[in-house]
Structures are given as structure tokens and as C-alpha cells.
Amino acid sequence: MIRLGAGRPERIVAVGAHCDDIAIGAGGTLLTMCLARPGLRVDALVLSGGGGEREQEERDALAAFCPDADLRLTVLKLPDGRLPAHWDEAKASVEELRGRTEPELVLAPRTEDAHQDHRGLAQLVTTAFRDHLVLGYEIVKWDGDLGRPTAYQPLSPEVAEEKVRLLQEHYPSQRHRPWYDREAFLGLARIRGIECHERYAEAFAVTKLTLDLGTLNLGE
């Protein structure tokens, strides 16, 4: 298993179409990074859920998933499931985010996600953040769209358990959903862990990656 690091990023961006997307797809990665790097700046954008119960859930949850981080969260009010009809607003919000930060890493939905809101946001992110490392997180759902990941972030057993605990604690509005349970979240993490020779992991799709494996000037 080849391990490539991204150095020690000082700024990251995390985006989601809905409240809880970021935490489900990359909550363990956020916990791992923020625990290792106190003061890490996290610029987060969520397109829907603003102004109500869901926004407060998201603010409380991301504060817990990003301990000791400089968290800057924006939650918009675009209607759930209607991103294509509000494309200009979504595009403007992603471009505004891009204009105020220069991250070393971007966490976003996968471009192959079956949900139109997730997929649309992924397309906007890869257009706005052209020269950045963008990791596309996965969200288990009815559509059965989980693919073959190309990148993995191992999670310690403690972090994997804490992710599940925080998801259950901070999103009470989602507990009634049949897929929203410990077995689903920890089970997927266990499968991704097997795939990268770890106990648990979160998996990501990498749309484009430029390597820097050293330089050699043949003229010298």
C-alpha cells in the first residue's frame, strides 16, 4: 500500500449539499486532522438547511468534529433536492468560498454520486478549485452508488467510534431514517479499512492528482 501525504495543511475546505453530508462522508478525517493540527482553519459550506433546526444541528456537529479548529461555517437555504434549479446561486456560493480561501485540501461529494444535489456540488467544486487536491467523499444510500475508491484515510478505532457517536448525538432529526445507524457507518468504515490494510478508514475519489516526486534538471 503506497502512502502519499499532503504535508501539514494549514487550511482546508469542506462542502456539503445538505446538513450532515460532511460529517457522514468525512467526519473521521476531519477529527483526525483537527486533533493532529490544533488551529487548523476549516472553511465549510453547506447549501441547504439554513435558518432552522438543521442549521443548528450542523453548527453543533461540525464544532464537535473540528475540535480546536478555526471553523468558519456558512449554511445556505437552497431547497433540498433542487440544486439544478438553483444552479446560479450554488455556483456563486462556491465561487465566493474559493475567493476567500486558498486551501491545501478540499473535501467534497463525489462527482459520481447518484444524488443530484451531491453530484452537482461536486461538479461546481472541481471547477472552482482547479489547482487543489479535491477528495470526493462517499455517502451510503438507497441508490447503491458506492464505487471503487482511489484514496483512503485510515481511522483509529477511537476515532471511528467517536464519529459514530457524534453522528448519533448531533443529528436527532435523522435518527428515524432506516440507514442512519451505527451498523451502517461503522460497517462501511470497516470495509474501507480492509481495503487499505487498516481496521477502519474513510474512502475518497480523486478526480485529478498532480504528483511532486522530486525534480531533476538534466542541464545541471
Image (cartoon, grey):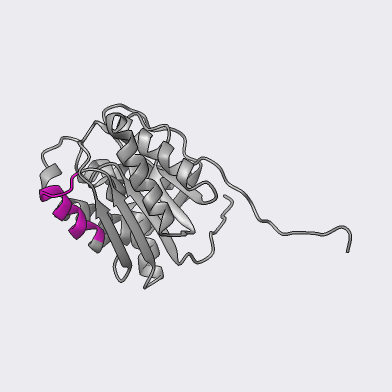
On screen, residue 105 above or below 16: below
Residue occupying image coordinates x 28% and y 51%: 23
* Left or right: where 100 falls relative to 46: right
> What is the x, y in percent for residue 87?
33, 34
The front one of 24 and 120 is 120
Magenta segment, principal secondary structure? helix
The front one of 130 and 68 is 130
Q: Is residue 157 visible?
A: no
> What is the x, y in percent for residue 113?
37, 32
Can you name the residue that lies furthest to the right here? 219
As for residue 51 lying within the magenta part, the answer is yes
The front one of 35 and 21 is 21
Residue occupying image coordinates x 53% and y 59%: 6
As for residue 169 lying within the magenta part, the answer is no
On screen, residue 43 above or below 47: below
Residue occupying image coordinates x 30% and y 62%: 72
Image quarter where the C terminus lies is: bottom right
> What is the x, y in percent for residue 30?
35, 58
Quarter holding residue 47: top left
Which range is magenta?
49-62
Q: Is residue 121 visible?
A: yes
Quarter holding residue 100: bottom left
> What is the x, y in percent for residue 75?
23, 51
Total marks shown come to 0
* Left or right: where 216 falls relative to 183: right
